């Protein structure tokens, strides 16, 4: 770790914290994907609370506030809590969120009861036992970094080696069990890794940061990709990057590290939720607006063609009156038509250019074809069982079938 | 008023207020909202302290309530985008708010010894010591306050009974008959936020979280009817209050902790013994089915 610490443009303690945050971010990002996709994002919160009775029991048994013993106690209690969650859910009726809540509140209640026993047994150095759990990033040592690096490597290795069975168990547990995959063993392995990650994170950076670190990178990665094989490395990458960025920002502004990392992580999620390509809120809103605008321009084009067919070239106001659209909407549609070279302005009177007339005819043909498809489509022997694209029937049905549709319409008109 | 009675009554009122809302949270799969609120109120306390320069209960509760509402509405908005599931939304919003609070404390209030334990989280053992005179009779403040919350929740649930029911079980249908699931969900969550903050101040966070989740989860094992579920939830809450207090006295241990553990014991009993969903009942049914199939196979000529 030495050279890596020297590499960063930071004081020694800040560099240790930054590397620790990055390593924890990588681990939490990779493991968090599985928690988030199974709708158990708050499992870290429950494990953090479940650690309290473990710490108390470890203290009661050994009578010493030794870091190693307490961590083992916390990890053991976390594992028991995690298994209790699985058992409660397996009974079938209780949903994951309620199972997590039950374990969280009852284990923490047990911890409080044990704390009162410890307090009344008058051990001299029991003070601050519960504070011990909710640590501070500044307390990181270089030795902790090796533990964290080992944890990150183990998590990535397990996820990489067991990727296919993990994926199958994640998305279709029943199928996974029926193919003879050791689903329970895998679940226990992943839970064990998660417990170790939470306990290490708990002592070094605190419970709340751990909750955010398990969730935020996974949620952000989910916005960027729909494939699990990409989501895990992206989440690990985001987790690591968020850890370093937060630690650097915190040391630059002299703010506490954990909260700054949380805010950076949540900021990344909000940015992804708003802007993610193809999925983000703003992206979808933009696409919807563009679509509405195109539809409006097409509608105004058809209205204008109809009006020109019926009489002299109208003004924008007259066009609005006959089409029943709001004047503002008509003007916006006309502006778009003008930009695409479909409109010829003749002293306030509107005409179509050749391109515009061609586009209007194509539009009308498409609409007529769609009407014909709705009325006579069932009589065609469409070779393809799929429903054709209603916005461009000629392309998806082919010229032959489109012409037959028109012929059917003409037949019916001749008959009536 | 008798101290024991005051404590049990305070816990019972919290159990009632929580029992009226808890079943809806469990059925809507947002049980952990209560835990989220318990952390998310920190920036509200910091702001209240910075504005009023005091740790008087009223401004602190008001500030906490504002951020509790911010928390539930932010979760609702994030979930409403359709991109983030409700569990992940909760796990994102409350750490962010809590972090804002911690940063606020280190930046502007580091000298003030401001934290959740000392400002907003009460201790139920102290409930009898804080009294108000009520027409010549001294009543604990927590009882008056929580009685108000119970009344508020009761009126809310009674007034919006149909709406709450339909949006909980079939939001799509609710929308078609003109009941907005979004609006009802927001009203419910705001009521949860107010209940939680008021109860934190009287009895501490973990007891409120326990009573909002555990009795409702136990009741969901025992019945399929909503109003029965609420009645069972409130009953289990009172059992936890009374049983928890007596065991805390007997063991000389934390009152809130013992009440939480009794609630958990009720949950375990339900999980094991529920006639329909209990572990034992299901095992018996499975064994009987196995025997019947074995008998049928034995009767059939090979």
Image: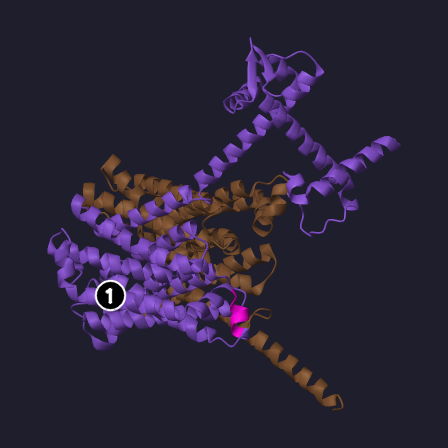
A145 within the magenta span: no
Comparing A403 with A141, the one in front is A403
Indicate the chain coloured purple by its letter. Answer: A
Residue A295 falls in image quadrant? top right
Residue B154 is situated, as x and y percent measured from the top left of the image, at 52, 46
Residue at the right extreme, as displayed: A415
User: Whole-percent x and y of residue A156?
Assistant: 33, 66
Depth check: B210 or B253 in front? B210
> Helix, strand or loop at disc 1?
helix
Residue B201 seen in the current view: no
Q: Residue at x 58, y 19 (%)?
A: A353
Residue A140: image x %, image y %? 18, 60
Residue B240 locus on image (x, y percent): 44, 63
- Near mark 1 (Cα within 10 A), the count class, few <14, some 14-19 or many ≥20, is some
- Can I make out residue B45 in this image? yes
Left or right of A245: which side holds B170? right
Q: What residue do we see at 57% from left, 65% from top? A: B222
**Is A301 situated above or below A80?**
above
Q: Which is the main secondary structure of the residues drawn in magenta?
A: helix
The hue of chain B in the figure is brown
Up-down: is A329 above or below A367?
Answer: above
Q: Quadrant of residue A133?
A: bottom left
- Residue corresponding to mark 1: A149
In reply to whether residue A175 is colored magenta, the answer given is yes
Q: Nearer the viewer, residue A123 or A201?
A: A201
Q: Which residues are magenta?
A: A172-177
State left or right for residue A98 relative to residue A46: right
Q: Most extreme residue toward the top, as rendered?
A: A347
Quarter occupied by residue B274: bottom right
Mark 1 chain? A
Q: Image quadrant for the C terminus of chain B?
A: bottom right
Q: Residue at x 13, y 61 (%)?
A: A3
């Amino acid at each position: 770790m030495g050279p890596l610490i020297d590499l960063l443009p930071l004081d020694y303690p800040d560099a240790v914290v930054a590397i620790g945050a990055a390593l924890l971010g990588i681990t939490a990002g990779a493991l968090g994907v599985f928690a988030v996709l199974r709708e158990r994002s708050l499992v870290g919160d429950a494990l953090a609370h479940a650690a309290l009775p473990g710490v108390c029991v470890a203290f009661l048994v050994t009578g010493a506030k030794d870091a190693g013993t307490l961590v083992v106690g916390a990890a053991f209690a976390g594992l028991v809590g995690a298994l209790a969650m699985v058992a409660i859910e397996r009974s079938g009726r209780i949903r994951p969120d309620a199972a997590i809540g039950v374990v969280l509140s009852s284990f923490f209640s047990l911890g409080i009861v044990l704390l009162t026993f410890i307090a009344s047994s008058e051990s001299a150095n029991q003070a601050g036992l519960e504070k011990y759990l909710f640590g501070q990033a500044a307390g990181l040592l270089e030795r902790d970094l090796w533990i964290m690096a080992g944890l990150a490597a183990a998590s990535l290795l397990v996820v990489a080696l067991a990727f296919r069975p993990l994926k199958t168990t994640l998305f279709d547990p029943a199928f996974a069990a029926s193919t003879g995959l050791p689903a329970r063993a895998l679940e226990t392995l992943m839970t064990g890794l998660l417990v170790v990650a939470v306990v290490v994170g708990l002592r070094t950076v605190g419970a709340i940061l751990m909750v955010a670190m398990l969730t935020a990178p996974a949620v952000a990665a989910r916005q960027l990709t729909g494939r699990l094989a990409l989501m895990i490395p992206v989440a690990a990458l985001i987790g690591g990057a968020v850890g370093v960025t937060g630690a650097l920002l915190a040391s630059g502004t002299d703010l506490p590290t954990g909260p700054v990392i949380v805010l950076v992580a949540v900021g990344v999620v909000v940015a992804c939720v708003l802007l993610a390509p193809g999925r983000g809120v703003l992206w979808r809103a933009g696409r919807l607006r563009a679509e509405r605008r195109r539809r409006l321009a097409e509608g105004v084009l058809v209205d204008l063609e109809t009006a020109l067919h019926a009489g002299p070239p109208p003004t924008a106001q007259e066009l609005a009156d006959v089409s029943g659209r709001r004047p503002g909407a008509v003007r916006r549609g006309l502006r778009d038509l003008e930009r695409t070279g479909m409109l010829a302005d003749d002293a306030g009177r509107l005409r179509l250019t050749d391109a515009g007339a061609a586009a209007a005819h194509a539009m009308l043909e498409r609409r007529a074809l769609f009407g014909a498809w709705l009325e006579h489509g069932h009589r065609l022997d469409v070779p393809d069982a799929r429903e054709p694209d209603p916005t461009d029937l000629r392309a998806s049905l082919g010229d032959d079938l489109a012409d037959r549709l028109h012929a059917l319409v003409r037949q019916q008109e001749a008959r009536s | 008023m008798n101290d024991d009675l005051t404590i049990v009554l305070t816990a019972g009122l919290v159990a009632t207020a929580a029992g009226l809302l808890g079943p809806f949270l469990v059925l809507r799969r947002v049980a952990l909202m209560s835990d989220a609120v318990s952390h998310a109120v920190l920036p509200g306390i910091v702001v209240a302290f910075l504005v009023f320069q005091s740790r008087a209960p009223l401004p602190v509760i008001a500030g906490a309530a504002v951020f509790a509402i911010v928390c539930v509405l932010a979760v609702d908005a994030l979930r409403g985008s359709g991109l983030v599931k409700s569990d992940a939304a909760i796990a994102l919003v409350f750490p962010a708010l809590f972090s804002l609070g911690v940063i606020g404390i280190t930046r502007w209030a580091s000298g003030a010894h401001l934290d959740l334990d000392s400002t907003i989280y009460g201790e139920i053992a102290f409930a009898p010591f804080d009294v108000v005179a009520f027409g010549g009779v001294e009543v604990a403040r927590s009882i008056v306050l929580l009685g108000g919350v119970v009344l508020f929740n009761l009126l809310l649930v009674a007034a919006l009974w149909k709406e709450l029911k339909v949006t909980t079980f079939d939001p799509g249908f609710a929308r078609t008959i003109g009941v907005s699931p979004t609006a009802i969900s927001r009203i419910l969550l705001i009521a949860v936020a107010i209940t939680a903050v008021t109860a934190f101040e009287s009895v501490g966070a973990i007891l409120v979280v326990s009573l909002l989740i555990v009795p409702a989860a136990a009741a969901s094992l025992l019945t399929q009817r909503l109003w029965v579920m609420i009645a069972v939830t409130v009953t289990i809450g009172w059992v936890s209050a009374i049983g928890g207090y007596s065991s805390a006295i007997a063991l000389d241990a934390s009152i809130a902790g013992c009440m939480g553990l009794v609630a958990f014991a009720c949950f375990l009993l339900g999980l094991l013994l529920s006639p329909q969903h209990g572990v034992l009942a299901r095992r018996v049914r499975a064994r009987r089915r196995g025997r019947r199939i074995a008998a049928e196979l034995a009767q059939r000529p090979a």
